Image (cartoon, helix red, strand yellow):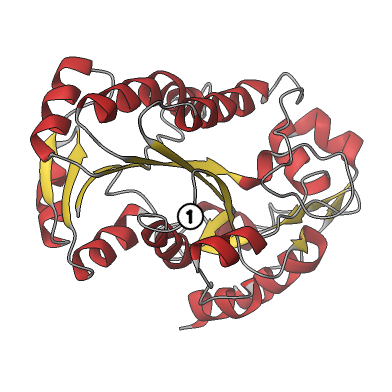
């Protein structure tokens, strides 16, 4: 199939493009950085220069790719120090709208977009699922992030004439991610700057980037339009996984910090992750996408990532 991918050099894209090519798909990958052409070509895809904030050029490159499937994996975290989410929020709102319009004009039949599993409402019992609403009344400090994700999902699922697929990924780990040996979370753990806040009951659902890419590959041809949660099998509170992670890094044992103190000195989103977020269920993705994570548990995945 002809696949048009926006976000080929990101965390998932680096795993996804070789999988797509190996399966025999023709991949056109858009980038706004000509210096990334060589990396895209090395993965077996055809690079094209474009920008989701330039609708005319975007329409041109999408139409030229004659896509059957559009995959939206665009993010830009940390683009500005003042608001690390601002550029990605814009990508998820304005960029998604432009890409959906270009996909429809280009004749694509399916539109697959990256979303987030750990922004579901923290109220309620058990794991979150595809019917769990997003945390749209989140604290003001990170409410725009949740609203942007909600808008991405809305635009994807209401794209008339196309099948909209939303993949709510868990916390990525693997090469090139925040949790890798050279990533910022590993650096913070080594420096003793990753305390467990409050009771550490914030529950993480992780997913290895290779497993996230494999689920995306399955979504090309499997599953009815809708939302799918892409996480591993073993949700874990931070009080459980962070000490294991630190030990694998030979980092100091994580300390403790009261939630009230953390709210005065830390990012509210960081405090939410550590104290409130819910783990997520992958039951629907397994059943309807025919997907099975190769890294079923973060324990095995972290060990392979940090000690190999």
Measured along the vertical axis of the image, is residue 176 above or below residue 153? below
| Residue 282 visible to an observer of this rendering | no
Q: Which image quarter: residue 263?
A: top right
| Residue 83 visible to an observer of this rendering | yes
- Left/right placement of residue 213 relative to residue 294 reads left
- Residue extending farthest bottom: 308
- Left/right placement of residue 40 relative to residue 257 reads left
| Category of crowding for the residue at label 1, using alpha-carbon neighbours closer than 10 angstroms: few (below 14), some (14–19), many (at least 20) | some
Counting from the top left corner in percent of width and height, residue 105 is at 22, 24
Question: Which residue is under mark 1?
Answer: 223
Counting from the top left corner in percent of width and height, residue 185 is at 57, 55
- Camera-side residue: 216 or 265? 216
- In the picture, the quarter occupied by the N terminus is bottom left
Measured along the vertical axis of the image, is residue 189 above or below residue 152? below
Counting from the top left corner in percent of width and height, residue 278 is at 78, 49
Measured along the vertical axis of the image, is residue 203 above or below residue 71? below
Measured along the vertical axis of the image, is residue 85 above or below residue 5? above
- In the picture, the quarter occupied by the C terminus is bottom left
- Left/right placement of residue 137 relative to residue 158 reads right
Question: Which residue is found at the position 13% from the left and 39% from the top?
Answer: 66
Label 1 SS: loop
């Amino acid at each position: 199939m002809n696949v048009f991918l926006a976000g080929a050099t990101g965390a998932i894209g680096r795993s996804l493009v070789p999988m797509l090519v190996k399966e025999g798909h023709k991949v056109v990958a858009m980038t706004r950085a000509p210096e990334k052409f060589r990396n895209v070509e090395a993965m077996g895809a055809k690079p094209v220069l474009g920008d989701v904030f330039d609708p005319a050029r975007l329409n041109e490159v999408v139409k030229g790719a004659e896509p059957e499937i559009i995959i939206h994996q665009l993010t830009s975290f940390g683009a500005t120090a003042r608001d690390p989410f601002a550029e990605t929020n814009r990508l998820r709102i304005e960029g998604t709208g432009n890409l959906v319009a270009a996909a429809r004009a280009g004749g694509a039949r399916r539109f697959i977009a990256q979303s987030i599993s750990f922004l579901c409402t923290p109220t309620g019992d058990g794991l979150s699922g595809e019917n769990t609403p997003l945390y749209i009344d989140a604290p003001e400090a990170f409410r725009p992030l949740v609203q942007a994700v909600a808008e991405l999902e809305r635009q994807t699922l209401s794209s008339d004439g196309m099948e909209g697929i939303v993949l709510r990924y868990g916390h990525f780990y693997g090469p090139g991610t925040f949790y890798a040996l050279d990533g910022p979370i590993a650096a913070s753990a080594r420096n003793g700057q990753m305390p467990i806040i409050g009771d550490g009951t914030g529950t993480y659902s992780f997913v290895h980037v290779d497993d996230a890419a494999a689920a995306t590959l399955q979504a090309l041809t499997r599953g009815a339009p809708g939302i799918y949660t892409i996480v591993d099998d073993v949700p874990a509170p931070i009080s459980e996984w962070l000490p294991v992670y630190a030990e694998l890094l030979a980092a100091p044992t994580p300390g403790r910090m009261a939630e009230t103190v953390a709210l005065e000195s830390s990012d509210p989103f960081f405090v939410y992750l550590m104290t409130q977020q819910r783990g997520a269920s992958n039951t629907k993705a397994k059943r309807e996408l025919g997907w099975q994570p190769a890294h079923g548990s973060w324990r095995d995945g972290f060990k392979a990532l940090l000690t190999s």
